[in-house]
Amino acid sequence: MTSAREVSVPSEFRRIKAVCLDIDDTLLDSQRSARRAFMALTGNDAAWPMWQRITAEYQARMMTGEIDFETMCLSRTRDFFAAFGERLGADEVRARERRRMSAMRESWELFDDVTDCLDWLRASGLAVAVITNAPGAYQRHKLASVGLVDTFDAMLISGECGVAKPSEGIFYAACAALDLAPHEVAHVGNSLDVDAEGAARAGMHGVWLDREARASTGLSASGDPVSVIANLYELPELLVCDLPYLEGGAGASARCDSLAGSG
């Protein structure tokens, strides 16, 4: 596999001018942090699947604006313990949620492939942005905790701009913030439907970061073409060798092979 540091980007081949990235489970290993926090809350992770189901239900309601982030967190904790017959008062719910959140914040960390990828994007002259679904203060605190708060040219956070992925609006807003057309921007995220397909519908290059190797096709359910990578080490080669030639005609593969082989 060609690494980020090995792929050079001659300006005559570059079509993509910016890359947008999701945060949770794309840059930060949020799933592992959440599971560690759950264990701090319960003492084991045997009921993790139930916690995930309750989380998905409340996150869906938060994304539609029905409830806010704090209500989501407190209601989830209350309902989880209620499912096991433990009825908690409001003060106890808050105390347990504070304990869980403290453990979560202590375990936030980047995936191993993030720093090299961001360094390569910057060295290649590409603009870099974030598009994420969550409250603004919470996401900014995450990025600050891992040293990335000043890394990005633009940050589109659903809690601040009033629209969430996969709505086309948040992707259009990112392009406007970067002063670029959608076809000049790639968006990378760990969710096929929310990230890759949503970006593709907005005219961007949708890239599914499939860390769990679930992909079987490069075509989304909606018929929009999306690219698939297994980790961020693969992103530079995708940007250099594939995306510039999606409509490049004959000879594109040969040019790509020559370019990648010269690194």
Image (spheres, helix red, strand yellow):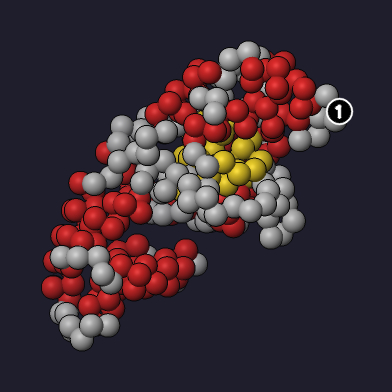
Tell me where residue 112 appears, x and y as whole percent.
Answer: 37, 34
Q: Position of residue 140 (x, y in %)?
A: 35, 43
Name the element at disc 1.
loop
Identify the residue at horizontal 68%, vertical 55% (top origin).
220
Q: Which quadrant of the figure has residue 51?
A: bottom left
Residue in the foreground of this view, choosing between 37 and 151: 37
Q: Is residue 25 visible?
A: yes
- Is residue 74 something one can see in this rendering? no
Say if 171 sits above or below 238 in the image: below
Quadrant into which the C terminus falls: top right
- Percent across and percent down for residue 39 are 20, 61
Amino acid type at mark 1? Ala
Who's the residue at 37% across and 39% down the image?
111
226 left or right of 152? right
Tell which of 164 and 239 is nearer to you.
239
Residue beneath disc 1: 250
Q: Position of 170 compared to 98: left or right?
A: right
Question: Residue at horizontal 46%, vertical 53%?
Answer: 133
Where residue 10 sits, quadrant-wise, is top right
The x, y position of residue 152, in whole percent, is 45, 31
Against 238, residue 68 (above or below) is: below
Would you say 215 lies left or right of 56 here? right
Disc count in the image? 1
Give the residue at the far bottom of this rendering: 85
Task: Please name whichever residue, 6 or 243, is drawn nearer the observer in this view of the structure.
Answer: 6
- Residue beneath the point at 81% across and 29% down: 248
Q: Residues within 10 Å of mark 1 (few under 14, many from 20)?
A: few
Question: Which quadrant of the structure image shows residue 93?
Answer: bottom left
Q: Quadrant of the N terminus?
A: top right
